[in-house]
Image (cartoon, helix red, strand yellow):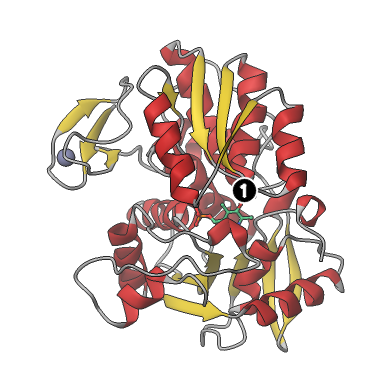
Amino acid sequence: MRLVCTECGQELALATRRWRCECGGVFELAERPRFRPEAINAESFSLWRYRAMLPALKEPISLGEGWTPLVPAHAYKREFLAKLEFLAPTGSFKDRGTTVLVSFLRELGVDAVVEDSSGNAAASLAAYCARAKIRCRIFVPAHASPAKLAQIRAYGAELIPVEGPRENASLAAQQAAQRSYYASHVYSPLILEGTKTIAYEVWEQLGGRAPEAMLFPTGHGTLLLGAYYGFRDLFDAGLIEKMPALYAVQSQACAPLAKVFHEDLAGLPDVPQGETIAEGIRIRRPVRWRAILKALRETGGGVITVSDDEIIAAQRELAHQGLYVEPTAAVAVAGLREGPGERSIVIPLTGSGLKAHHK
Ligand SMILES: *Cc1c(COP(=O)(O)O)cnc(C)c1O
Ligand SMILES: [Zn+2]
């Protein structure tokens, strides 16, 4: 498999330690596996049932991730199907991408990685690295959530606090990556190969159909883009007639995608990193913003913004139906309020309430 830069088109072997192109562009896979329904391993109840459609790996590092339940729920007098991503091994959907990335890293012979994240991405990486016996160092903003830090530490990862804004932790990790491997959820295209399996699962769980719409809490858009790729694979294989409309839901306080989408800007605008309870999507510069816009436009979806009060109300409404999620995960449900016109809607509940801040 090969990587290709989305900016300058330069190609590179997948087996590289480079995490982005010399020109600063991000990599995607030059070609992606096709979806073949007959190749599904029906005896596997993890996302590795789609192994034939994943990058070829000798031995997956798996904790049983994926194949999450789809259960009926409601909010704002609307029915939807909730995909319980918070039941993943480390409590968030991030495990879908991590299992693929860490399996690849072990095959590449990587014995130490670095990453920057204050939360779920780091917890997920730390868990899979523990499983693969890869040394893991995480650069975290000094103000990160204590429950998430405790989880990361429990897996045996080394935590390095970095003062100042969130970007400082990224810069510190990228610096350290010169002598290690930057196992980034944001930059690695293998992450999207893992997250695409959510689309395959929804399609199987609906009896071989796609929903009319899906809503995602969106920061860097790794779940939204994965779903886009997954449904496009199904579409290309002639298994669905129409792509679901994909909606990115962002916090009003930090909504770069809303601005670039609604104002049809040529470049990503500089937005303030406002305060929001949705810490998992407080992302000023989504690296794959162009690909996200294309996915939204092509599927007839869009961007919805919500306030912290609406997020808290949605989180409470979910809890009153037995679904305990972190505020970031409630963002997409809050988006139903001014939500889309489609009737059959699937919303992934991306992260567990057990490790969130309690207010
Ligand atoms: C990471 C995360 C998100 C956002 O994912 P992106 O890939 O940044 O869009 C949403 N919810 C939870 C719980 C997360 O951990
Ligand atoms: Zn390039």
Tell me the residue at 55%/51% (across/down): 198
Residue 62 coordinates in the image, percent (x, y): 64, 27
Along the line of sight, the residue nearer the viewer: 100 or 181: 181
| Residue 147: quarter of image | top right
- In the picture shown, does residue 302 fall above or below 291? below
| Residue 72: quarter of image | bottom right
Along the line of sight, the residue nearer the viewer: 256 or 324: 256
Tell me the residue at 22%/44% (across/down): 25
Along the line of sight, the residue nearer the viewer: 263 or 294: 263
- In the picture shown, does residue 350 fall above or below 187? below
Amino acid type at circle 1 is Phe
Residue 188 coordinates in the image, percent (x, y): 39, 37
> Furthest-front residue in view?
163
| Residue 269: quarter of image | bottom left
Quadrant of the image containing the N terminus: top left
- Residue topped by disc 1: 93
Q: Is mark 1 within 8 Å of ligand 1?
A: yes
